[in-house]
Structures are given as structure tokens and as C-alpha cells.
Amino acid sequence: MSSSTVTRTLINLDQFRVVSRDLTKGTFTGGAFTAVAYALLLLLLIAELGAFLRKNYQTNIIMDQNNDELIQINFDILMYDLPCKYLKIGVWDRFGEEKINSTDQFHYIPVDHKGQYKGMAYSKEEIALLEQADLNSDVSDAEKKELDADWSSSSDNFKHQDFHAAVTFHEFTLVNFFAEWCVHCRHFAPMWNEAAGRISEKMQFQDADGKQTTVKFLKMNCVDFQGKCQEEKIQAFPTIRLYKRDGSFEQFQNKRTVENILDFVTHTVRNSHLMVAQHHAIFDQGCQVQGRLYVARVPGHFGLQAEAHGAVNVNPALTNVSHQIRHLSFGMQDAKGWAERQSIPKDMLQNIQPLDGRSFSVDRFHEAPQHYLKVVSTKVQGKEGVFYQMTHTDRVRKLERTSDKATQARFSYDFSPMSVVVKEKSKRWYEFLTSLMAILGGTFTIVELTSGAVETVGTAVKDALGKKN
């Protein structure tokens, strides 16, 4: 078969016949729409090509098929105020058994308090004062009403259980110990009420250190609360005492008048040095501990706390377990780097090590930061590695003040029975070509129809205007 025969056959087969250029004409409108069409075609071509070359991922949730008995926990934690020699690491599963691997897996690095502050031990007075301050700050509104209420009757709506708490709740508390049968008490009652109305939590007084404070007035019925008055060794009525926050008191000895009471309060407060204490570091160094733990794939927790070392004992309840998490992850040590090399979406990458660089601090006794982690295994389809995502919540746990338990920076973890499978998703080459042709053809057709419509409308308008003229 000659080439001319093939040519004639293809010409007869042509389904895209063209109109001779001599039978068509170009227009300004058509040229403008053609330029727009070319620009749109180029833009859509680039966008579609970019979508074809870009990697997309989809996720599926399946039952976790990982049969490994143990999982690795990688950690690097800085304890701000707990020296390495007092630091204990413990691991417990849900069954309560402690399973700790060799301490050779851990590296303890002593660190100081940035060279700005050296720790020192608390004195007994500081501990008592801070305990009382912490206790007062935890008081609810109902408890405050209880502490501020007069002990005038055992049949009112208040419990009146702790007189010491009532007189140490404020910086200064002036107490009137009276008996209902006492004639002197009945005569003194109007003056006491007048003084309380003028002074109680209203008038400002200045102590020996220049600090402004107020005085709370309180009444104690020694008939209804005979036992409490005996404990306070009240021997005469009425007896007036000014209690300080530390529990000590000064007794009023002058003639019972409003002015004398005011002078007594002013003089006593002016000569009082209130001890001011604040929470501070106990030790002159902290500890950065790094290592790996291998734990069973069951719910459990690991914790960092203080313990005695050698002949030196510490009070675990008063130690501060504030800390910074420099690194915490499950599974591979470099799980995030591996996931980044697999081009895993960023919203997944941020869940691999969500705690890195975060600090958790407390500034009161008997408190400790607690962490709760939900761990989900994640696998990339077609790859060998598995990485773990986790969600995190935290709270500050408050221990009972009478408890001898040590404060513990606890990390509780639980493993999800579900697993996330990440699958790479991209267009096949024929899907790309089909989509490209549809977009380009549709764009060209729409622009061509729009151009023809505009040209037709324009011609009709011109013809109409010509006839009018």
C-alpha cells in the first residue's frame, strides 16, 4: 500500500474536519477570548500537573496487629530541684508489679539552677507557715464562711470543729471568750459589737515591717464550747486575746472600752514581725535523666520521685518534682525523623513527640504534675517501620497533707487497641490524562461558546442601533 493511499484513507476517516480559512474571519472579541482561553489552559495545566506529582495520604483504622510483648519508651527529663542521688525511677503496670530494667540504661547528669540561685533546706517555721498558707488558699467559699463565723452557739448552721484553724486563718484575730451567765460579759457585749463594727476587717493597721493588715473579730461561747475554752486555758470571763497567724497570742489587760481595745490592737500589731516565707528550691542542683524503658504493652505508668540516699534522709512529701520534658516518645528513638523522611503529614508528625520542650511546675507542698498518655501505633503501608502517636492531658495531683506518700512526677500510659494505617494516594497516569483532557476540552468549549454569544449579541446591538439611525 502506497503512502498516497494511506493519506487518502486517513483524510476520508477524518472526523475533525475544518472549515477553510477563506470562509471564516477573525474578530476582536474572538481574539480577546482566545487570549483568556490560553491563559486559563496554561494555569489549569500547571495545577493539574502539580496535583498529579504531589503525594497525598489517606488513613485507615484497623485493629492493632502488633504482637510485640514489650515497647520502648525513650525519655529525657530535667528535674529542676531533685539531685540525681535522691532520684528514683519506678515502673508499674496495671497489675501493680514494679518492673524496672537495669539502671545501666539510664544516664544521670547533675545540673545547677542556672547559676542564679542555690537551694537551701526549709526551716520548721517556714514549713508550718507555708503549709498554713497553702491550706488557706485551698479554702472554698463555704469553708471560709465556716472559719469566719462566730463561735456563739453550738446550734447554729456551722460545724465549729477546728478553733486553731479559725484563729490562724487571718493575720490577726481578736477573740472574745465569754460565758452567757457572766454579768461582766453582758455589760461588755455592746462595746464589743461597737468595736467589731468599726474595726473588724475594715480598719488598716501597720505591723513592725511596714506591712498593712487587718484584724478579724471573733466571739467564743465558753458555755457551748467548754472543751475548746479549757484547751485554751481560759480562766476568767470575758477574756480578750489577739491571735497571730502562727498561733501565738497577746492578752488584753486594760479596762474594757472601745478606745482601749483599739489602742491594744494598734500597739500589738505595730510591734509584730510577721514571718514571710515563700516556696524555694531545697537543693543546690537538679538532675537531667535520660534513658530507655522497656514496658509491657498493657496500661501502666512510670514515675520520678525522691528517696533517701545513704545516711541522708529527705522528706519525700516536701520535695518538688517540677520538671521539663526534653524528650518523650514511644518506639524508635528517632521515630519523628523516620516519619519525616516518609513525608508523613505534619498533623501526624506533631503527635509523635508532643511534650518535647514543655515544662510542668508546682510551687506548693504535696503537689505533683501528672501526665496521661493515650498511645496509638501508626504504620505506613509498604514500609517496615512503625511509629507511635500520642495524645496528652495533664493535671496537678494534690496529696493529703497527712499522707506520707512521696510526690511523684507520674506518666500514665495506655495503648489503643486500634492502629492507624497511612497509605500513599496518587492519581494513575490514565486518570491524569483523562482529567487533563476533560479540563482542557471543557475550558476551550466554554470559552468558545462565550465568545460566540458575545459576538452575536454585539452584532445584534449594532444592527439595532443602525436601523434607528
Image (cartoon, helix red, strand yellow):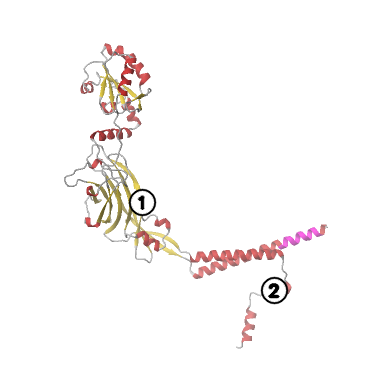
Question: What residue did someone put label 2 on?
Answer: 19
Q: Is the magenta stretch mostly helix, strand or loop?
A: helix
Compared across the picture, whether 317 is left or right of 3 comes to: left
Quarter of the image that includes the C terminus: bottom right
Residue under numbered circle 1: 357
Which quadrant would residue 149 be assigned to in this image? Answer: top left
**Mark 1–mark 2 CB contact (< 8 Å):** no
* Magenta span: 455-466
Q: Give the structural element (helix, strand or loop) at label 1.
A: loop
Closer-to-camera residue (264/348): 264
Residue 313: quarter of image:
top left
Give yes or no for residue 456 being in the magenta stretch: yes
Q: Can residue 119 be seen in this view?
A: yes
Give the mark, 1 or 2, whose residue is nearer the N terminus: 2
Please state which amino acid type lies under the numbered disc 2: Val
Q: Picture coordinates of residue 166 (x, y %)?
A: 29, 27
Q: How far apart are marks 1 and 2 (CA)?
A: 72 Å
The type of residue carrying mark 1 is Gly
- Tell whether position 154 is magenta: no
